[in-house]
Amino acid sequence: MTAPPEDSAPVLRCAFFRGRVSPGCEAEFEALLAERLVPLWQRFPGALEVRLLRPLDADDHAPPLALVLSTRYPSLAAMRDALASDIREQTREPTRDLLAMFEGEVFHTTFAVQDCGMTPLGLAAS
């Protein structure tokens, strides 16, 4: 893998929740995300956006993903600063509570972001 210079390119840090929410825990899982974790994740220093991605459709052979948490930072250095912050420590207890309601594994990948523009609504790219 080739990493961009730490101060020059935006990055996305994604947490992939591979598995499923424990049956019967769906409402509590969602409430914990909305009420405790998302507000903390939004306070990470340098975080430009926090998104929760939920699958609507997938290939037959795709691994089961219950959720992907995506946080955008202006640079790899900014992300590393955020991960070293006091806010991250504040997420540890609610994250343990969340994972107690989850059957599977969570892993993280950081991506370099290359914005390629957008297709105007209703127009196909030629």
Image (tube, grey):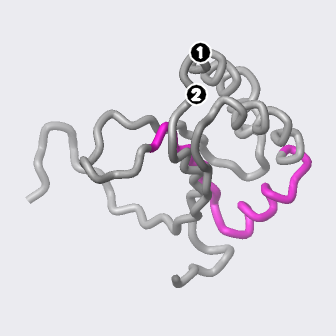
| Residue highlighted by disc 2 | 22
Amino acid on which disc 1 is placed: Ala
In this image, 33 relative to 69: left or right? right
Label 2 sits on a secondary structure element that is: loop
In this image, 113 relative to 63: left or right? right
Q: Earlier in the sequence, mark 1 or mark 2?
A: 2
Q: CA distance from mark 1 to mark 2?
A: 10 Å
Q: Which mark is residue 46?
A: none
Image coordinates of residue 92 in percent, x first then y, are 83, 42
Image coordinates of residue 37 in percent, x first then y, are 73, 32
| The stretch drawn in magenta includes residue 69 | yes
At x 89% / y 46%, what residue is drawn? 89
| Residue highlighted by disc 1 | 27
In the rendered image, the vertical position of residue 20 relative to residue 9, given as above or below:
above
Amino acid on which disc 2 is placed: Ser
Task: Magenta stretch: give its range.
Answer: 65-87
In the rendered image, the vertical position of residue 84 relative to residue 120, given as above or below:
below
At x 73% / y 52%, what residue is drawn? 46
